[in-house]
Amino acid sequence: MKPAKHLLAACAALIMAAPLASEEPVMETQVGEKGFVSPPATIDQLDWLVGQWAGKGIQEAPAMESWLPPIGSTMVGTFVQETPDGSIMFSEHMYILPQDGSLALKLKHFNADLTGWEEKDDMLTFRLVAIEPCAAYFNALTLRCADPDNPGEGLVAAVRMQSGGELSFRFSATD
């Protein structure tokens, strides 16, 4: 065997014999322990979230999220996921509002024809798990600044799926 081939064979053997790194993927979302208590928080702590955000979503198709300034103690947001051919796949209508001295995010999903995913009087509720100056970690749903040093430039939105995986969106400011 020529020296170069011998060296390649030795490297290949070392690589194959080495244990694979089993690093867990870093999850954007947090999940509260059963019976967790949400931390104290007010809607004013989410002023960095106000604006219009756009980026790639499901199937690399465009997605947009918008948050209005607080009206009283509630923020209203929308999310729209497009299909790859440019029509609406689905949308979400969201509220972040006070709950038990903390905050909760409530949302409803809608198909393109405005039929709801949830029953008429039902919605998904995500209680706050943790809050930071530029991040809100709701139970299985995260909203945070892409860069805490530049809060108005980008938004990361992530949701933990029932399968245990995450959908994570990286948005840029559009206004």
Image (cartoon, helix red, strand yellow):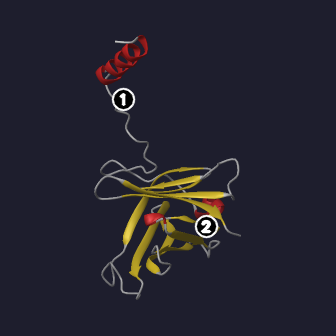
Q: Nearer the viewer, residue 56 or 156?
A: 56
Q: Where is residue 55 in the image (x, y as percent from the top left)?
A: 57, 64
Crowding at dot 1, Cα within 10 Å, few <14 / some 14-19 / many 20+, comes out as few
Q: Residue at coordinates 34% horizontally, 58% vertically from top-left?
A: 161
Q: Position of residue 122 (x, y in %)?
A: 33, 78
Judged left or right of residue 174, residue 17 is: left
Q: Are dots 1 and 2 in contact, CB under 8 Å?
A: no
Label of residue 53 in the image: 2
Q: Can residue 44 be seen here?
A: no
Q: Can residue 20 be seen here?
A: yes
Q: Earlier in the sequence, mark 1 or mark 2?
A: 1
When the figure is inspected, residue 8 is found, relative to residue 143, above or below; the finding is above
* Position of the N terminus by quadrant: top left
Q: Which of 29 and 18 is in front in this view?
A: 18
Q: Residue at coordinates 40% horizontally, 76% vertically from top-left?
A: 108
When the figure is inspected, residue 77 is found, relative to residue 41, above or below; the finding is below
Residue type at numbered disc 1: Ala
Task: Give the farthest residue toward the front.
Answer: 2
Residue type at numbered disc 2: Trp
* Position of the C terminus by quadrant: bottom right
Label of residue 21 in the image: 1
Judged left or right of residue 38, residue 55 is: right
Q: Which of 175 and 122 is in front in this view?
A: 175
Q: Residue at coordinates 62% horizontally, 76% vertically from top-left?
A: 71
Judged left or right of residue 132, residue 173 is: right
Crowding at dot 2, Cα within 10 Å, few <14 / some 14-19 / many 20+, comes out as many
